Amino acid sequence: MIASQFSALFVAALLSNAIVKLWLAYRQLHHVAAHRAEVPVAFLEHINIAAHHKAADYTSTLVRFGTLTVLFDTALLLIFTLGGGIQWLSDASAHLTDSLLLQGVVVILLVLMLQSLLEMPFDLYRTFNIEARFGFNKMTLKLYLLDAVKGLLLGAVLGLPLLFGVLWLMQGMGDLWWMTVWGVWVTFNLLLLFIYPTYIAPMFNKFEPLQDEAQKSRIEALLARCGFESSGLFVMDGSKRSSHGNAYFTGFGKSKRIVFFDTLLQRLSPSEVDAVLAHELGHFKHRHVIKRIAFTFAISLGFLWVLAQLLQADWFYAGLGVQTQSTAIALLLFFMALPVFTFMLQPLASAYSRKHEFEADAYAAQQTDANELVNALVKLYQDNAKTLTPDPLYATFYESHPPAPIRIAHLQKLGART
């Protein structure tokens, strides 16, 4: 009885999420189309009508494409769960080995591989059709496949030992296994933060020290004012994959490094680069990264506790279409079903992120000229074909950054004050 009720709840939540996502997409399409004819007044001096049309068309194309992925992901999840997909894979893995641990690893790997293979055509279409059509894609099919192979090997080297370890701990550490697993998970992620800049990122991109001495001196002076110590300033060859531009700092502790996309340096003036970097340093100054990491670790501990309560619950497995009960199946089902029941919390996460962006903008306005950040953002909006007229409700759900008009107006007020 409980299993059937949980099945009904799962299906209702899944379909409700899909309906909300499609409704939000409809709102976004309608709102962007309604404002396509005219550039917003605040951007008239910087964005021409052709660029505005391109942003509207690019946004609408991505949203329409997103509706297909929503329908596909919803159907795929139903096939894996109530459709018997996971149960079938579990039965097949039982014939391969007598080890319950190995059976669990095989089931999880098969689901992940099937999901990746089925989603690959969507990724290929977006990269080589949509991104190429709007002039953003610079990636060749050879590079795409090479990235996929590297990602697969990296996942095997890092992910397989972690998966074996987690399943072994779940089976052998008693009722408090979730605390031990959490400790392993935290340690693993902190280790990744240290090794990513030096060992993992260079597997996919080239990182060269910033050569422009004048710009380097400006940036080092800004870093000194902000009290930021890094292991170096690097330029990444982002242009070999895309014409989109960005800048970020990565790493943890002494391994922190500042990275500029080559496309960003080619597009922005030195003072605009300073302003963009000051924004990123604002995240550091307000400890946004540490706060997000701490929040992620805290919420993961809560999720593992919930999983521990469900581990022996017959209705949990049966309610998601599985008769075989094991730690691996429980882990797989939990993290496949979790987004279904947490999607409606997305606006809270987006609002939290936008709050951080406003704080970082305010910090940038203190350290550099706010108008330079405005100029940089306008160029990035234009280069990335970012719509200037998103639907407010759609932005509330999905946008991690404030919508362009609101953000620019906020920066202009900050510039007027300073």
Image (cartoon, rainbow, N blue to C red):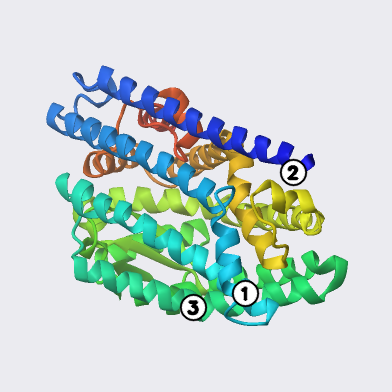
Could you tell me how far apart the alpha carbons at marks 2 and 1 are, in whole angstroms?
24 Å
| Residue located 22% across and 61% down the image | 239
Q: Amino acid at mark 3?
A: Ala
Could you tell me how far apart the alpha carbons at marks 2 and 3 are, in whole angstroms?
35 Å
Could you tell me how far apart the alpha carbons at marks 1 and 3 are, in whole angstroms?
22 Å
* Residue sitting at the far right: 175
Q: Position of residue 293 (x, y in %)?
A: 62, 57
The mark that comes first in sequence, 2 or 1, is 2
Q: Amino acid at mark 1?
A: Ala
State the image quarter where residue 97 is shown: bottom right
Direction from residue 389 to residue 99 in the image, left or right: right
Asked if the residue under mark 1 is in contact with the one under mark 2, i.e. CB atoms within 8 Å, the reply is no
Secondary-structure class at tag 1: helix
Secondary-structure class at tag 3: helix
Judge the density around disc 3: few (<14), some (14-19), many (≥20) Cα neighbours within 10 Å: some
Quarter holding the C terminus? top left
Q: Position of residue 314 (x, y in %)?
A: 78, 53
In depth, the one of 386 and 140 nearer the eye is 140
Q: Which residue is mark 1?
A: 94
Secondary-structure class at tag 2: helix
Judge the density around disc 1: few (<14), some (14-19), many (≥20) Cα neighbours within 10 Å: some
Q: Position of residue 100 (x, y in %)?
A: 69, 77
| Residue located 20% across and 66% down the image | 141
Q: Which residue is mark 3?
A: 156
The mark that comes first in sequence, 1 or 3, is 1
In depth, the one of 366 and 174 nearer the eye is 174
The mark that comes first in sequence, 2 or 3, is 2
Q: Amino acid at mark 2?
A: Ala
In depth, the one of 414 and 346 nearer the eye is 346
Q: Which residue is mark 2?
A: 3
